[in-house]
Image: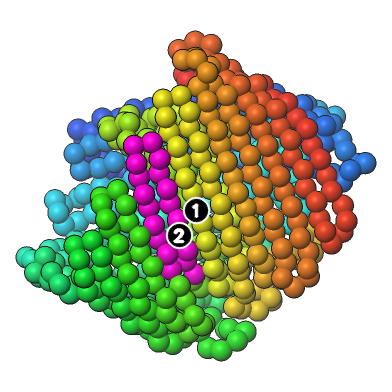
């Protein structure tokens, strides 16, 4: 069954939001430089287990994919826009799966409508991900499995910035976000957020401060709406030009029906900020919120050839909010940092990043925690680190993560998601994973790509543990200035401790990518 049609697609919120992002650029970007790069990718795959069935029940198939796409880049004096879209039409031999059409979109733009005063940001995304974190995963578009959902998100955010001499500067921002999917039981989501941020100016040298106040109203098509109020103030005491002590106090409140104590209360933290250079920074806090002890960590280091990131955060959130906010490391944003040392021009760098992602078949996010879909509020604690090495002939990306989720609302919120194929869906889980990519340019026209990922999902209630390992090895050669051919080997295997079953898949694919 086809997942969508082109006619339906243009009416979807994410697609309309992408057009809105484009439209909002028009006035300030009439003199902008725009580049449009249509592409067409053809892929033929042979798999010995295209359904990812347990060992002994494998079905082989040839899979044909036709993938037209386009990338758009615009850069003006007061605006910037980037977007990539691809439609993947998938058909199977031997009647092992139904033909389908999968959409992938990543669009973001920013514009300065009034110099140094009024700005607007916008994003739109469409992706396909696994509905449940258990069982065979949708780690490639070719698999004929039911554990796949198309999720569409968008965000529009106008804001005002104002500087009050050397005393303070302020930002007032309104953000509207939305999410929809093709999965029954996963609630559509709309959010309206008002946020005010004020921080001290240059007049405060020894002791600086900032204050944040926000109110979010979240509505769902099948659940009660939820409000969230947040207020927090931070003081920084500068011990040296590079090192500061920090302290904060605040209050936050949610209106969801909690399965534990009321989701509201005062908060506080102490910590430090360390910025030894423009390329290195590290900040950490420890404190308490209404749910218990709370910690945070954010660090980044850039050198001539490497980019390092480490972060730890914990918060009350939902799957919908995470998908809209793109909480995982964006592949595009991460590679933009990596390539910034060698490509100064933003437009040229954006094109290089887009070409690299297409050539290496990278996902939209690195080390993406495949936690599945849920309507429940949960406390998430997440530690993540990544490193990139970029030299003249080689690029290496490695990312690791450890995520713990504990539900805060009742299981009844997920009644619509408990289908026959999803009985083991449990929100209280821990997931650990690592992903890596090695791209080696053998000659100016030929490169090798080794892509691997492993992650383990553990249910903390049922003691079920699922392991997933995917490895691909590809060789790409530029056949002409606008055409690239790729041959790729794939190995995917998984095991489930609770059922005692496992699966293995071997596949070979041939790509032909053309810039039209």
Q: In which quarter of the image is residue 457?
A: bottom right
Asked whether residue 513 is drawn in magenta, I would say no
| Residue at the left extreme, as displayed | 165
Which numbered marker is on residue 306? none
Q: Could you give the CA–CA distance between mark 2 and mark 1, rounded to whole angstroms?
A: 6 Å
Residue 301, x across and y down, in percent: 36, 49
Residue 372, x across and y down, in percent: 65, 58
Do the residues under discs 2 and 1 have CB atoms within 8 angstroms?
yes
Instruction: Please provide the residue range marked out in magenta.
Output: 296-314
Asked whether residue 298 is drawn in magenta, I would say yes
**In this picture, is 368 found above or below 100?**
below
Residue drawn at 27 percent across, 33 percent down: 344
For disc 2, the marked residue is 311
| Residue at the right extreme, as displayed | 56
The tally of labels here is: 2
Residue drawn at 20 percent across, 50 percent down: 113
Residue drawn at 75 percent across, 56 percent down: 466
Q: Is residue 232 left or right of residue 454?
A: left
Q: Name which of mark 2 and mark 1 comes first in the sequence.
A: 2
Q: Using the rendered image of the protein, determine whether residue 388 is visible from the camera's viewpoint.
A: yes
**In this picture, is 410 found above or below 59?**
below
Residue 52, x across and y down, in percent: 80, 42
Secondary element at image label 1:
strand
Residue drawn at 78 percent across, 64 percent down: 464
For this rendering, which residue is in front, 452 or 255? 452
Q: In this view, does 45 lie to the left or right of 220?
A: right
Q: Using the rendered image of the protein, determine whether residue 10 is visible from the camera's viewpoint.
A: no
For disc 1, the marked residue is 385
């Amino acid at each position: 069954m086809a997942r969508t049609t082109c006619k339906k697609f243009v009416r979807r919120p994410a697609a309309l939001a992408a057009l809105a992002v484009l439209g909002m650029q028009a006035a300030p970007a009439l003199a902008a430089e725009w580049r449009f790069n249509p592409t067409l990718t053809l892929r033929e795959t042979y798999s010995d287990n295209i359904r990812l069935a347990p060992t002994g029940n494998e079905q082989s198939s040839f899979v044909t994919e036709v993938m037209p796409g386009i990338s758009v880049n615009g850069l003006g004096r007061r605006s910037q826009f980037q977007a990539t879209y691809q439609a993947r039409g998938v058909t199977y031999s031997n009647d092992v799966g139904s033909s389908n059409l999968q959409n992938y979109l990543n669009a973001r733009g920013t514009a300065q409508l009034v110099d140094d005063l009024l700005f607007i940001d916008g994003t739109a995304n469409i992706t396909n991900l696994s509905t449940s974190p258990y069982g065979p995963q949708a780690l490639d578009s070719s698999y004929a499995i039911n554990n796949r959902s198309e999720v569409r998100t968008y965000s529009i955010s106008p804001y005002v910035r104002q500087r009050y001499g050397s005393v303070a500067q302020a930002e007032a921002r309104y953000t509207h976000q939305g999410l929809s999917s093709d999965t029954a039981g996963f609630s559509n989501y709309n959010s309206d957020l008002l946020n005010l941020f004020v921080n001290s100016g240059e007049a405060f040298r020894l002791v600086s401060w900032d204050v944040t106040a926000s109110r979010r109203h979240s509505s769902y098509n099948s659940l009660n709406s939820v409000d969230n109020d947040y207020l927090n103030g931070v003081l920084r005491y500068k011990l040296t030009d590079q090192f500061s002590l920090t302290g904060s106090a605040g209050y936050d409140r949610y209106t969801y029906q909690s399965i534990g104590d009321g989701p509201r209360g005062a908060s506080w933290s102490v910590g430090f900020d360390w910025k030894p250079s423009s390329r290195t920074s590290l900040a950490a806090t420890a404190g308490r919120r209404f749910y218990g002890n709370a910690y945070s960590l954010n660090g980044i280091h850039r050198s001539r050839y490497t980019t390092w990131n480490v972060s730890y955060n914990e918060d009350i959130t939902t799957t919908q909010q995470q998908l809209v906010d793109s909480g995982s490391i964006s592949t595009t944003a991460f590679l933009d940092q990596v390539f910034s040392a060698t490509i100064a021009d933003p437009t040229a760098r954006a094109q290089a990043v887009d070409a690299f992602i297409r050539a290496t078949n990278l996902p939209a996010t690195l080390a993406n925690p495949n936690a599945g879909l849920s309507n429940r509020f949960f406390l998430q604690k997440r530690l993540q680190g990544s490193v990139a090495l970029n030299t003249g002939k080689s690029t290496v990306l490695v990312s690791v993560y450890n995520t713990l989720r504990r539900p805060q609302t009742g299981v009844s919120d997920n009644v619509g998601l408990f289908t026959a194929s999803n009985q083991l869906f449990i929100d209280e889980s821990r997931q650990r994973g690592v992903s890596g990519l090695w791209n080696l340019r053998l000659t100016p026209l030929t490169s090798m790509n080794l892509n691997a990922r492993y992650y383990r999902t553990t249910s903390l209630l049922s003691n079920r543990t699922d392991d997933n390992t995917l490895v691909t090895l590809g060789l790409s050669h530029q056949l002409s200035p606008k055409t690239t051919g790729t041959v790729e080997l794939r190995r995917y295997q998984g095991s489930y401790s609770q059922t005692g079953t496992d699966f293995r898949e071997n596949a070979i694919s041939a790509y032909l990518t053309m810039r039209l």
